[in-house]
Image (spheres, coloured by chain):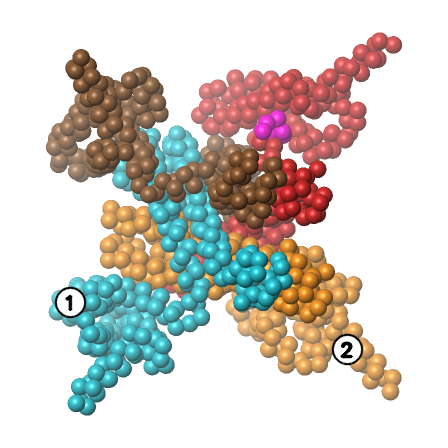
Chain colours: A brown, B red, C orange, D cyan
Amino acid sequence: MASPQNKRDWRFLLHEIIYESNTAAGKAFDVGLLIAIFTSILVVMIDSVASIHQEHGRLLQRVEWCYTALFTVEYVLRLISIRKPMRYVFSPLGIIDLVALIPSYLSIFFIGAQSLLVFRALRLLRVFRIFKLSRFLTEIDFLTIALKSSLRKISIFLLTVLTLTVILGSIMYLVEQKENGFSNIPESIYWAIVTITTVGYGDISPVTPMGKFVASVVMLIGYAIIAVPTGILTHDLAMAAKKEKKELPEACPNCGREGHDGDAAFCKFCGAPLL
Amino acid sequence: MASPQNKRDWRFLLHEIIYESNTAAGKAFDVGLLIAIFTSILVVMIDSVASIHQEHGRLLQRVEWCYTALFTVEYVLRLISIRKPMRYVFSPLGIIDLVALIPSYLSIFFIGAQSLLVFRALRLLRVFRIFKLSRFLTEIDFLTIALKSSLRKISIFLLTVLTLTVILGSIMYLVEQKENGFSNIPESIYWAIVTITTVGYGDISPVTPMGKFVASVVMLIGYAIIAVPTGILTHDLAMAAKKEKKELPEACPNCGREGHDGDAAFCKFCGAPLL
Amino acid sequence: MASPQNKRDWRFLLHEIIYESNTAAGKAFDVGLLIAIFTSILVVMIDSVASIHQEHGRLLQRVEWCYTALFTVEYVLRLISIRKPMRYVFSPLGIIDLVALIPSYLSIFFIGAQSLLVFRALRLLRVFRIFKLSRFLTEIDFLTIALKSSLRKISIFLLTVLTLTVILGSIMYLVEQKENGFSNIPESIYWAIVTITTVGYGDISPVTPMGKFVASVVMLIGYAIIAVPTGILTHDLAMAAKKEKKELPEACPNCGREGHDGDAAFCKFCGAPLL
Amino acid sequence: MASPQNKRDWRFLLHEIIYESNTAAGKAFDVGLLIAIFTSILVVMIDSVASIHQEHGRLLQRVEWCYTALFTVEYVLRLISIRKPMRYVFSPLGIIDLVALIPSYLSIFFIGAQSLLVFRALRLLRVFRIFKLSRFLTEIDFLTIALKSSLRKISIFLLTVLTLTVILGSIMYLVEQKENGFSNIPESIYWAIVTITTVGYGDISPVTPMGKFVASVVMLIGYAIIAVPTGILTHDLAMAAKKEKKELPEACPNCGREGHDGDAAFCKFCGAPLL
């Protein structure tokens, strides 16, 4: 009877360490994992530089294998320490972990698959879990609320920008000759995006006077409408802050409902005097 | 007697489907139309790529004809389902529909007119009608109010920027030699717009030390004044939100004081029940 | 006795037309002048294009003379219609008018001085006087108040940015080799300004890995600190709006002082009941 | 007994002049020092221009020596006028002063060390001390409070942007061929930073259609998320202003209600005189 209990304890403890970050061991695991992810990405990065690959390629490959072994062990531990392993496998983080792991094996068996190792960079998204450890939590929560409420409005904004770039790119395709880099409509739309976002590579740029005029209009539009997402987010941050504040005042002693203003003397729901 | 009644019903129903989006059929029509517009633009886009045009040009031309037929039928249906067709023809959306349709016919009869098909992209503006279907309505309304009240101020801002670019462009024309790309004043103004909007293609860039100094000033101006449209819009969003809020609550019938929350049943100042 | 009175009236009338814009004639003069300025700049612009200059240079030169005559008459009229002409001559607009006029005469007597005609663009600054005619006045006033209160803070910000660019430019001069475009420190500072303002011409760009790393840091700094002027201005706009609002409530019937809050029942200065 | 007293006075006076800026002499010293720093940097800048170095190199070197002597004297005076010299030596400003001084001596003894003189630019950071002299203090304080409270949130934002650039850069490395400039992952990440910050040099830019599509996504992300730091800072500026305001007014001694303006002499709720 002690054995299954023991086994359950062991799995429970492992779960605590791997999935939770309340305990010291859990925190250490999270930080250690992040360091492992970060250094493994660094190795992939360095290995992608041709000169380093030629000289130290063999060494880096071995280091690569160690990381593969490490992440495989981690993945297996995650599977056995959770009650419903399938739930983890098909969770967003689980999918990322798998997608980051598979190329490691592919790169062993197939030549050329090594470049797929970059998918390991996706695991960097785990960095956002680390914030749960720290005092950053309030700020993250606050930002998340504001971003969520802004998301829909900013989506409308981006859709508008995209529609604009299709129209402006098409106009530019007509205005500029094909020889000037605006060789087809998708290319012109790419140019419009480069211009309206004020990136301005200069790989394609207008040559004819008329094209330069249209480009000037596109630039001024881009310069003026950047105000829109900023305005939206700033406003939603203020709303989120106000909401947070409003929820502070205490509950009515009569009906128990909350949400009274700071200057309220009577409960706005039942009319009983507050405090 | 049944026939005209019937006919009227038939036209009424068609009007409901084509112009309104309250019914399921109306929604389906709007979504279907948007998909048709989007795919037709995709065909024009793809056909503009030289390699694809050479290989599949004939096929794409036929698809083009189908879309032309489809949009012609749509246009005719719009005309016969509305009481005053001229009103639709001269409405903004009606003009866009016609401008998008005419090149389709021109491209059949005239060689080279095919590139005018890009005007079909203008129909993408119908995308904003689709929002009426969805829950995005409140956000759109809110943004529209703020944008409208900002429009005049942002126009002043853009006029100021344009005046600045004319002056700075003219100065740059004097400072830099003609060989350095600043070959005439309009060109220099184009450069000033590219620079002040922080796009920075690099197709024209200062060469002389004095020119680089002037350019640095232009850049810093552009970097600092981008704050203006953002500040204006953010402020107007806040104003729009405050206005919306203020119009909600009524005054207390007992003490007459206002400023109650939308969900208040009792006056928060004197405790009397609100309406 | 009628003659001097008459003459005074005539000068007074001229002053009304030229300097004020309350009357219909004054408005017409201002609008007409702005059109003249705008078209004269257009002529200078067009004349700067080499191909047009070769073909229509002679014609444009004559048009130029007409504008010179017109603006000379305007300047003389300004001088004789004002009581203290020297005050106008040394006012900012007066200096601009003179600076814009002198090159016109220089270009007649000296070959090559024609390019100085671009100084006429400075007269475009008169465009801001035109706003006084229109309903834009409130918006302009509002913006001006906010911009004035922001000016000092934004100056500090720009000074900080300049200090940063000197330091970062100097570091980059050390990091990158002279062959890579960073040939001296002023050049490197120019690059730092191009980068930190996110203009990014690409005429000078880092080549070495270390240089690219430093450049990345500069870019991220530029991307993050653009928030500063925007935040300042937005905040000052909100303050300006609040101030404006606060000044609305009426004066105390007892002491006559203003500036009471909307919810004040008693004068905060003398204690007398309001209203 | 007079001598040590005298000596102490002399050192006290020197301390007042060098470290404090309350007295006229202290202000003059600070301004003079800043001018010396600024001109010495100007000399280093000018000397870095090859053509000037060739012609006036010898003269500039002598001027350099004068500055070295001047700053050495200043450093020694700082050491002897303070009670605990080590405290100054290891303070941030003390380290900057030393780091700026050492290259001056290295450049005398070693050829080539002259380029290290650029570290003198770090001394420009003293410019922020000068604000203490002036009325700018309130603005600086206000900005500093808001920036401090924003710092943590903007760090999270920059960390997110960096994670994004690693992921997007890695994807781009896969998408684009090595010949197109994306020769290794660090290079691709550099491109992602150039693009997401909307700098857009154009030294590396996508060539393949797929690469252009990914680049467009990166640009639109960069264009939309620039709203985040701006929104955060604007919000924190408003919070800082509110806090400052709230701390000003005291409660009414009669009714105990708060929220009075700073200039209020009577309670606006009950009319009782305020303290």
Q: What secondary structure is the stretch in magenta mostly built from?
A: helix
* Residue appearing at x 41%, y 45% in the figure: D198
Disc number for residue A240 = none
Q: Is circle 2 on the same chain as circle 1?
A: no
Instruction: Give amino acid for label 2.
Output: Arg
SS state under label 2: helix
Q: Which residue is mark 2?
A: C11
Between the residue at mark 2 and the residue at mark 1, the CA separation in whole angstroms equals 74 Å
C72 on left or right of A104? right
Q: Local crowd at mark 2 within 10 Å, few (<14), some, or many (≥20)?
A: some
Q: Is residue D228 above or below residue C87?
A: above
* Residue nearer the viewer, C257 or A163: C257
Q: Quadrant of the C terminus of chain D?
A: bottom right
Q: Is residue D266 above or below residue A204?
A: below
Q: Which residue is mark 1?
A: D106
* Residue nearer the viewer, C128 or C266: C266
